[in-house]
Image (cartoon, grey):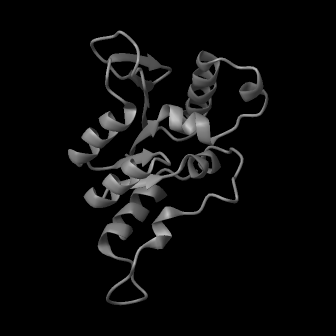
Amino acid sequence: MPHIVIDGYNYINRIKPGDVQNNANLEMLRNYLLERLFNYKRQKPNKITVIFDAYKSPSLTRQRENYKGIDVIYTKENETADELIIEWIRRKPSGMVVVTSDRAIIDEAKRYGIAFITPTKMEDLIGGYKNEDEEDRTSKTIKKGNPKKLPKKLRKVTRDISKIKI
């Protein structure tokens, strides 16, 4: 079963949830995202972790909570969600799928052969709106060898991503 790790604020900033975005504070936006993920999780029981930055908060430790079966982590003081996600990627856990549009995280995921999708692609999976400007990042690899066969890493990524589709 895939473990979906989401860069929380990156996701919120990439997806414009219409009415919620217009007059919402940060807590409302987080709750909106978590509720959408909960509805997705009811249909597809994947493990989901959402990591939010608490970079400027005075907390000396990471804060963890469970929102209806979704693991929510707030980073500690002087730590970003990006740093924590990259740390997890370097451990190379099997079945991990990272959801972000952050270039540094995507590059690290590619380097370690970890599957990744963009927030707009994840929105498509959970029934959100599709942003036509966002392209599939996995299609930009240079192929060597048999032109009809994807490289081994991309075949693995495709298998991992296909496991989370509705």
Q: Relative to 1, does residue 111 appear above or below in the rendering? A: below
The image quadrant that residue 54 belongs to is top left
Report the residue that reaches farthest toward the left.
91
Q: Relative to 96, does residue 110 appear above or below in the rendering? A: below
In the depicted view, which residue is nearer to us: 158 or 76? 76
Q: Position of residue 124 (x, y in %)?
A: 64, 50
Q: Relative to 64, does residue 102 appear above or below in the rendering? A: below
In the picture, measured across the screen, residue 14 lies left or right of residue 50, that is: right
| Count of marks placed on residues | 0
Q: Position of residue 67 (x, y in %)?
A: 49, 19
Q: Residue at x 35, y 23 (%)?
A: 75
Q: Relative to 135, does residue 140 appear above or below in the rendering? A: below
In the picture, measured across the screen, residue 5 lies left or right of residue 139, that is: left
Q: Residue at x 30, y 42 (%)?
A: 86
Q: Position of residue 123 (x, y in %)?
A: 62, 45
Q: Position of residue 44 (x, y in %)?
A: 52, 41
Q: Residue at x 31, y 67 (%)?
A: 153
Q: Residue at x 62, y 31 (%)?
A: 36
The image quadrant that residue 64 belongs to is top left
Report the residue that reaches farthest toward the top.
58
In the picture, measured across the screen, residue 23 lies left or right of residue 45, that is: right
